[in-house]
Amino acid sequence: MAISVAIVEDEFAIAQDISTFLGDHGYQVIGIYESGEDALQELSITPPDLLLVDIRLLGEMTGIQLVERIKELYELPVIYITANSDRETYTKAKATLPNAFLVKPFTHSNLLAAVDLSLFNFSRNQVPDGISKSDGDTSSYETLIHKNLFVRANGKHEKISPGEIHFVKASGSYVHIHTEKNRYVLSQNLNSFLMRINLKELVRIHRSYAINIGNVESFDDTSLMIAGHKIPISESYRQEFLSRVRLL
């Protein structure tokens, strides 16, 4: 699934360039808006996974005011686009808890870095320390936006709905997320992954396994089957698993 992006930018050439470039890199641009008023009307109904917004827009509403209104409705990663990197602008923008800044003029490399950083900071609940802040290890991570899991691996973002996950397997200091079509590897342990994601669909059934309760095909006292995989159920997690089964 592609990551959906909304662009709020009153300079058409810049907005179109961002849209074309992100589209070529696997993102789905769901809308381009010149004013905060137009954006708010549509985005209140259809939330994007990521919002790129210029601080100065056509109309009476600024980009900062738009973000304040949007965040009254839902949380999502926000990138501010700005030609003004002064302290006053940054202070006002930072108060809305954005996840990255993109300073004009910028390159396509800057754009991809800002998208990557925004998703990483959102996953860690972090706000940049400065208006051009761009450091941090973003090589492998996950985050949850609108109940969908976002995984960055091998330089590409993947959007995974909860129902697509079959099971998660721990292997040392890594977790392997198995879906119908792919397997994703993250550098963290299973405990940390489950605590950070906190998806109700995932149930721990073994020290090395968590499964999607909705995708279980069959089970007995010691194991269960998901998509042709036989997965063990340990004694210490059996009652939790059985209690979840009874709720379905």
Image (cartoon, rainbow, N blue to C red):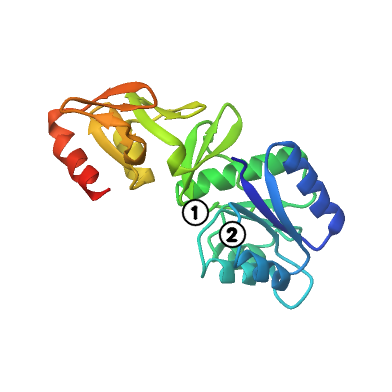
The residue labelled by disc 1 is: 146
- Viewer-nearest residue: 140 or 233: 233
Compare residues 226 and 63 and report the one nearer the observer: 226
Left or right: 133 in relation to 39: left
Tell me if residue 192 comes above or below residue 28 in the rendering: above
Residue 132 visible here:
no
Residue plotted at (50% across, 60% down) = 75
Q: Percent from the top left, x then y, of residue 116?
A: 60, 41
Q: Which mark is residue 122?
A: none
Asked whether the viewer can see residue 194, the reply is: yes
Q: Residue at x 43, y 43 (%)?
A: 162
Residue furthest to the bottom in view is 60
**Up-down relation of residue 139 to residue 135 (above or below):** above
Marks 2/1 in contact by CB < 8 Å: the verdict is yes
Q: Which residue is mark 2?
A: 47
Query: Please, what is the three-letter code of the amino acid marked with disc 1?
Result: His
Whichever of labels 2 and 1 marks the residue nearer the N terminus, that label is 2
- Describe the element under mark 1 as helix, strand or loop: loop
Q: Measured from the top left, where is residue 200 in percent x and y?
A: 33, 48
